[in-house]
């Protein structure tokens, strides 16, 4: 970090530490070289007004009280592309495993409750009525970053780097 002033560099460094950016970087490149398909999903959180006031005093920020709190790399095997016929602007869906589906039906953890609460009514209904079948959650395109290695406009997924050297 070279730009900005000391306060902004301190803020960004603290935020990188909070979101565990170095671990995320390792996961990103491991998936990039393994499959060529990285689906990075952002979770935002609301910073309580008292903490936001402290942050603005310490770091001189005039940010809103909503900040990215966590990033995860989604398993490309569980992602489906849908929507546009030619994949020019696909809608991506996360396919739920039986375990994930069970957790969302039981709502036995704060994480499951929080995730279920954030879903649209149609998806909630599908989860409640699912009987072990395939259930999908639409991924918010504003929180999803998709990086596909050497994917053409008509391809829903990228091609792994090592694909060209693997024998048929």
Image: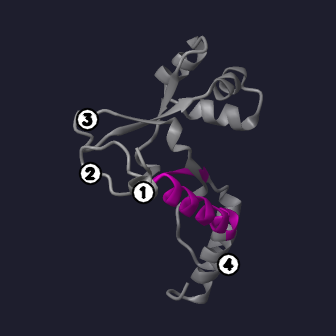
Which of the two discs, 4 and 1, sits closer to the camera? 1
Is-magenta flag for residue 63?
no
User: Which image quadrant for residue 88?
Assistant: top left
Closer to us: 21 or 81 = 81
What residue is shown with label 4?
58
Q: CA distance from mark 4 to mark 1?
A: 53 Å
Give the image location of residue 67, x and y in percent: 57, 59
Q: Is residue 16 above or below residue 83?
A: below
Find the distance from the CA under tag 2 to the CA under tag 1.
19 Å
Pointer 3: what residue? 84
User: Pointer 1 and pointer 3: residues touching (CB < 8 Å)?
Assistant: no
Checking the image for residue 152, the label placed there is 2
Instruction: Name the residue rendered at 65%, 58% in the picture.
Output: 49
2 or 4: tag closer to the N-terminus: 4
Q: Earlier in the sequence, mark 2 or mark 3?
A: 3
Using the image, determine if residue 98 lies above or below residue 118. above
Rendered-image quadrant of the N terminus: bottom right
Element class at badge 3: loop
Q: Kindly report which numbered mark, 1 or 3, lies closer to the viewer in this rendering.
A: 1
Residue position for label 1: 165
Task: Please state the horizontal and vertical placement of residue 137, each as a whole percent of the image.
Answer: 50, 30
Q: Which residue lies at the image location 62% right of the left edge and 64% below the top edge?
A: 26
């Amino acid at each position: 970090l070279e730009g900005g002033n000391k306060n902004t560099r301190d803020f960004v460094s603290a935020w990188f530490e909070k979101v565990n950016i170095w671990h995320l970087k390792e996961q990103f490149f491991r998936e990039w070289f393994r499959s060529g398909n990285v689906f990075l999903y952002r979770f935002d959180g609301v910073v309580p007004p008292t903490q936001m006031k402290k942050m603005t005093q310490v770091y001189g920020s005039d940010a809103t009280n909503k900040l990215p709190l966590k990033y995860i790399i989604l398993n490309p095997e569980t992602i489906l592309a849908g929507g546009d016929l030619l994949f020019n602007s696909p809608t991506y869906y996360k396919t739920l495993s039986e375990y994930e589906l069970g957790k969302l039906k039981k709502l036995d953890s704060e994480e499951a409750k929080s995730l279920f609460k954030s879903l649209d009514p149609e998806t909630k209904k599908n989860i409640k009525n699912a009987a072990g079948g395939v259930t999908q959650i639409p991924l918010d395109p504003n929180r999803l970053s998709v990086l596909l290695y050497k994917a053409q406009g008509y391809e829903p997924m990228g091609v792994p780097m090592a694909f060209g050297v693997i024998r048929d």
